Image: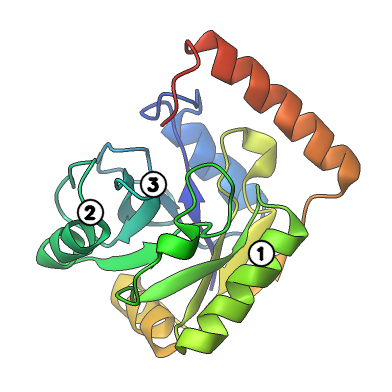
């Protein structure tokens, strides 16, 4: 199965994507499963493909993905508190884009995660490379996601697992057998993306998420 576990919908303050169109776009991109991981918001979705329950939580140090959770996780907690709450809600904790300059945990990272996001569709190649090295040094499973906020981003970065349903996807991630794939942003892609991000940042009143 191929999936994208880092997608944002209209329930995030920096995205306008409709869940139903996310599912249709994902299916056209050849995906079998997705996770809509909105910023500090937990909304259950159902679609034509396997939909994993998720949230991207803003801890005090940076962003953490909670995958397979069954309740919303509050923001502005420590890394340890956030990870503990994710596990209490039946989830697995993934350190998202650890070396992104904005909202990456970076050098503050604690060795407490179930997995590390080693390939993020919005990160520069060197940031993803450092995340790969980090996961290897900590002996942690690797995950990948597009971090889509626009439809055209969905599925550009993905992960492949030997699985058939939600539970086997979880096992594949935790076992470290997931394969990450997709393309990094080239220079032109980075320019277009950061132009859009700058515009959105201004429109929401220079407020970080």
Q: Nearer the viewer, mark 2 or mark 3?
A: 2
Residue 39 image label? none
* CA distance for labels 3 and 1: 19 Å
10 Å crowding of disc 1: few (<14), some (14-19), many (20+): many
Would you place residue 2 above or below residue 194 in this image? below
Quarter of the image for residue 102 reads: top right
Let me know if residue 2 appears in the view.
Answer: yes
Instruction: Give the structural element (helix, strand or loop) at label 1.
Output: helix
- Left or right, 152 with reference to 190: left
Q: Quadrant of the C terminus?
A: top left
* CA distance for labels 2 and 3: 19 Å
First along the sequence among labels 2 and 3: 3
Q: Nearer the viewer, mark 3 or mark 1?
A: 1
First along the sequence among labels 3 and 1: 3
* CA distance for labels 1 and 2: 24 Å
Taking the spot 79% from the left edge, 50% from the top edge, the residue there is 185
Instruction: Give the structural element (helix, strand or loop) at label 3.
Output: loop
Name the residue that disc number 2 marks: 78
Name the residue that disc number 1 marks: 128
Q: Position of residue 195 (x, y in %)?
A: 75, 24
Name the residue that disc number 3 marks: 37
Quarter of the image for residue 11 reads: top left
- Left or right, 133 with reference to 103: right
First along the sequence among labels 1 and 2: 2
Would you place residue 37 above or below residue 126 in this image? above
């Amino acid at each position: 199965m191929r999936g994208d576990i880092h997608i944002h919908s209209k329930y995030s303050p920096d995205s306008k994507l409709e869940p139903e169109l996310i599912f249709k776009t994902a299916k056209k991109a050849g995906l079998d499963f997705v996770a809509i991981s909105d910023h500090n918001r937990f909304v259950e979705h159902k679609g034509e493909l396997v939909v994993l329950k998720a949230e991207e939580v803003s801890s005090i140090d940076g962003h953490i993905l909670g995958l397979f959770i069954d309740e919303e996780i509050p923001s502005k907690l420590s890394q340890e508190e956030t990870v503990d709450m994710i596990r209490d809600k039946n989830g697995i904790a993934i350190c998202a884009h650890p070396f992104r300059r904005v909202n990456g945990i970076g050098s503050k990272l604690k060795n407490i995660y179930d997995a590390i996001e080693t390939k993020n569709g919005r990160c520069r190649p060197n940031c993803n490379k450092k995340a790969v090295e980090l996961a290897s040094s900590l002996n942690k499973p690797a995950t990948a996601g597009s971090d889509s906020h626009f439809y055209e981003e969905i599925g550009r970065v993905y992960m492949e697992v030997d699985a058939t349903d939600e539970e086997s996807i979880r096992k594949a991630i935790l076992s470290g057998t997931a394969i990450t794939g997709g393309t990094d942003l080239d220079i032109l892609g980075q320019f277009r993306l950061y132009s859009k991000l700058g515009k959105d940042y201004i429109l929401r009143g220079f407020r970080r998420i």
